[in-house]
Image (spheres, rainbow, N blue to C red):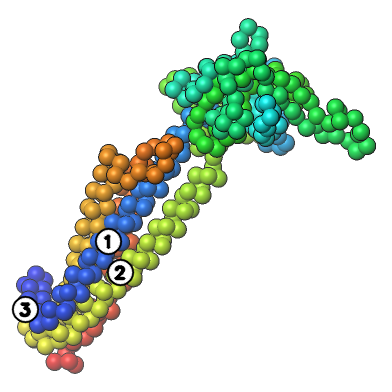
Amino acid sequence: MNLPFFIARRYLLSKRKKNFINVISMLSMVGVAFITAALVIVLSVFNGLEDLLRSLNNSFDPEIKIEATQGKSFHATPAVLKKVAAVPGVKVVTEVIEDYAYVRYHDANQIVTLKGVSENFIEHGRIPPENITQGKLRLKERHIPYAMLGQGIANTLTVDAGNTAFPIQVYYIKNVKGGTTDPSRMYARLNILPGGVFSIIQNIDESYMLVPLDFAQELLSYGDKRTSLEIKTIAGSDIQKVKLGLANVLGESFRVLNQEEQHKDLYSLLKFEKLFTFLAFSLLLGVGSINIFFSLMMLALDKKKDISILAAMGGNQHLIRNIFLAEGALIAFIGALSGLVIGGAICWLQQYFGMVSMGMETSITQGYPVKMDWTDFAATLAVMSVLTIIISYRPAILAARFGSPQQL
């Protein structure tokens, strides 16, 4: 006769003789729960950091950026600019000249990334008023050029944006041919007044200095060459469609990048770090699940006589094997589910109450950023399911052999 699965399981697993087996099973569940919760928390922190970086970078980066595929600059002729402006969805086209320069203010000096932009850069709205810490957002006023400095540069140079009596000296080293002895031919120099100071993200604040396009054009002797074009789209436009439209118009000589692609290496690195962290914690889950193997092995040995009786009552090897596989799955599932709930609860508390702070007064956000993603929960359950099958299979086979006709 065929015994029902639940009746056979209740008979086989009831009245365990050794409490030690129950202790090991409980430790297995606790270990799995602890590692699962830690995995969910760490993955959620990675998600939060990635979202924070995206929001900060996207606040300063253009929606679409056009660069030359070869070389660092290209000729931005009126024909090229007209083609770009005519693409559906394009609202603002900002010309950019970007290069390194040396700046001096009083007795302080620093190497900066000099970014010359056309006056419509302000229309992008990428430096909101709340990010201005000194002065105001301006590049030109009454035909007088002004520089916008990152907070880090302003701190290094001790710039006072309210003092228009002392300009910033900007130097650009030229490509000098051998044999040149006149120092004045080795560099170009222009002065510019500090207009304001902005603060967005540390790496931007410590490197970028914004100046009018014609100022950079004169200092760097770029003529009609530009290092990039920055595009702001019409509100509600599909950025991907605008990007494809620009790529079709400009051809293979230009590279059209959205905000994700402008920091492709950074985001790829974050994904790799998250992947290797997931693999490392999966290995820990495997180690923590070894207790399930030992508890099932001892259970099989402890219930050897009961397995024989169950086999004599009509329980086949397939039924006995499934009982032990189900027992291993139950231990792992309870542990994993508890870990997911605990990890999710901790992440929720951190997300809304910021229990763990960054530990720095100057940090961008008070608490560690976290973001829960259902794919992390699903991946953790999937890994736990595979590990459970692998770990439980050997004890289940051993238990099934105890119920074979040769063992009776």
The answer to the question of whether label 3 and label 1 lie on touching residues, with beta carbons closer than 8 A, is no
C-alpha span from label 2 to label 3: 26 Å
Q: Is residue 254 among what the camera can see?
A: no
Indicate the amino acid at tag 1: Phe
* 379 in relation to 391, above or below: above
> Quarter-wise, where is residue 291 in the image?
bottom left
**Mark 2 vs 3, N-terminal side:** 3
Q: On the rendered image, what quadrant is the C terminus found in?
A: bottom left
Q: Which of 51 and 91 is in front in this view?
A: 51
The answer to the question of whether label 1 and label 2 lie on touching residues, with beta carbons closer than 8 A, is yes
Callout in the foreground (2, 3): 2
Indicate the amino acid at tag 3: Lys
**Mark 3 vs 1, N-terminal side:** 3
Residue occupied by mark 2: 288
* 314 in relation to 190, above or below: below
Residue occupied by mark 1: 34
Which of the labelled discs sits on residue 15, or is there none?
Answer: 3
Which of the labelled discs sits on residue 208, or is there none?
Answer: none
Q: On the rendered image, what quadrant is the N terminus found in?
A: bottom left
> Quarter-wise, where is residue 357 in the image?
top left
Q: What element carries label 1?
A: helix
* 43 in relation to 166, above or below: below
**Mark 1 vs 2, N-terminal side:** 1
